[in-house]
Amino acid sequence: MSFQKFKPQIQAILDHKENSVDERLLDLCKLLKAEIPYYNWVGFYFRNGDKEELKLGPYAGEPTDHTIIPFGKGICGQVAVSNQNFVVPDVKAQDNYIACSIHVKAEIVVPLFVNGENIGQIDIDSNTPDPFSAEDERFLEWVNEQVAKIL
Ligand code: SME
């Protein structure tokens, strides 16, 4: 997958100041889901105020029941605590995993930092087994760096 070609489009979406931040993030989620065949659900979770929990932000894909995730729970909750990328090639092999859909085979979660603080994350579910590489990690780190500039 050549991620490079998406960068100008992503920058244009995020720079579109007539739209609210949530509208821009939604457009970003929709773009990633539409353009990358193995990105089947793309969404943002953000820390919910001062609480030790994540709250679902803009997303593209099937609605999920998991709009609030306590820190430490599931892949997302673990990333809120670890500050590290979490690549899951096979969700069935994870004990601490929150299933959103029976179709999901793999997941990647990359933390989003503002001024060095982990304030949320991008979460991607895939219906393809083991689809994510280091290239996805570098790309999503770049995406989050761009998002951080508009928050
Ligand atoms: N699977 C995630 C929950 C969020 S959904 O993928 C949208 C987890 O284990 O944290």
Image (cartoon, rainbow, N blue to C red):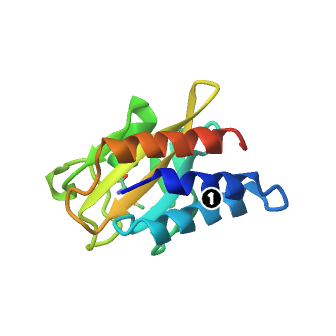
Front residue of this view, candidates 65 and 132: 132
Residue ranking furthest to the top: 116
Residue pushed farthest left?
A: 93
Residue drawn at point x = 62 percent, y = 53 percent:
8
Label 1 belongs to which residue?
A: 9
Which residue is rendered at x = 54% and y = 46% of the image?
143
- Considering only vertical position in the picture, is 55 above or below 72? below
Q: Quadrant of residue 137?
A: top left
For the residue labelled by badge 1, is the local secondary structure a helix, a strand or a loop?
A: helix
Q: In the image shown, does 78 or 147 lie closer to the viewer?
A: 147
Q: Is residue 71 visible?
A: no
Residue 43 picture location, percent across and down: 51, 59
Q: Position of residue 88 (x, y in %)?
A: 25, 49
Indicate the position of residue 1 as horizontal and vertical percent values: 36, 57
Ligand 1 falls in which quarter? bottom left
Q: Is residue 117 above or below residue 64?
A: above
Q: Is residue 99 above or below residue 84?
A: below
Q: Nearer the viewer, residue 110 or 101?
A: 110
Give the image quarter of residue 28: bottom right
For this rendering, which residue is in front, 57 or 48? 57
Percent position (x, y) of residue 80? 45, 37
> The C terminus is located in which quarter?
top right
In this rendering, position of residue 118 left or right of residue 82? right
Could you tell me the amino acid type at mark 1?
A: Gln
Question: Would you place residue 28 above or below residue 74 in this image?
Answer: below
Q: Which residue occupies the extreme right position in the image?
A: 18
Q: Residue at x 62, y 64 (%)?
A: 26
Residue for point 36% across, 61% down: 125
Residue 68 visible to an observer of this rendering: yes
